[in-house]
Image: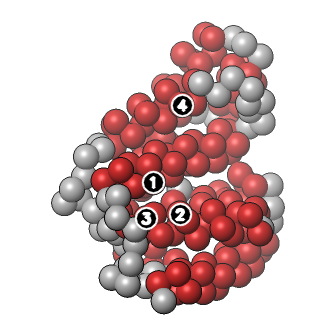
Amino acid sequence: MQSPSDVTELLIAWSNGEQAALEDLMPLVYNELRRLARHYMGRESNANQTLQTTALIHEAYLRLIDQKRVQWQNRAHFFGVSAQLMRRILVDTARKRHAERRGGTAERLSLDDAPALAHMPAREVVAVDEALTALAALDPQKSRVVELRFFGGLSVEETAEVLNLSPATVMREWKRAQAWLYAEISRNDA
């Protein structure tokens, strides 16, 4: 069983250029990456799914090892970056698969119902991503909270750890971001 300090030590060694540390790190974090990938894949519509969980993990891994200038802070930082990479891979895949712009047929989303959205159509993934990108321009912290909770499936406590915030702050930012995103997606649907 891995300890957060084992993972943190390996991440720091990897940041310092020790390639062997990456080889030791991956077996320790693979199951957590798999959990993140399954969470992401659960949001994609399975009907036209072209990307499998293992392929998502491997694509994220390839992008992670290309992160040359990242100074890994700790385990939470690593999984935060991993969640962000997986989000980007899935959004890119959804955009390729559904080149048409979202329209009036998009369903309204409640971020509170995120676990029930196991078969979210790709166009809705793109709509949420576009609204989240707009939110990031206005308030990066709220955007990261939504990204980690909605796309990454992290709990309030895990999100607080990644962002170095209190759980109460995460909940406050989560609720405000939900309201803003709902208004933004509704405005774009109109």
Residue that appears at 71% across and 63% down: 136
The image position of residue 162, as x and y in percent, is 71, 52
In the rendered picture of this protein, how many numbered marks are placed on residues? 4
Mark 1: which amino acid?
Val
Residue that appears at 54% across and 16% down: 23
Label 4: which secondary element: helix
Give the label, 1 or 4, closer to the camera: 1
Mark 2: which amino acid?
Asp
Is 170 or 66 nearer to us in this picture? 66
Numbered badge on residue 125: 3
Q: Which residue is mark 1?
A: 91
Numbered badge on residue 129: 2
Q: CA distance from mark 4 to mark 2?
A: 19 Å
Label 2: which secondary element: helix
Q: CA distance from mark 1 to mark 4?
A: 15 Å
Q: Are marks 3 and 1 in contact (CB under 8 Å)?
A: yes
Q: Which of pointers 1 and 2 lies earlier in the amino acid sequence?
A: 1
Q: CA distance from mark 1 to mark 2?
A: 7 Å
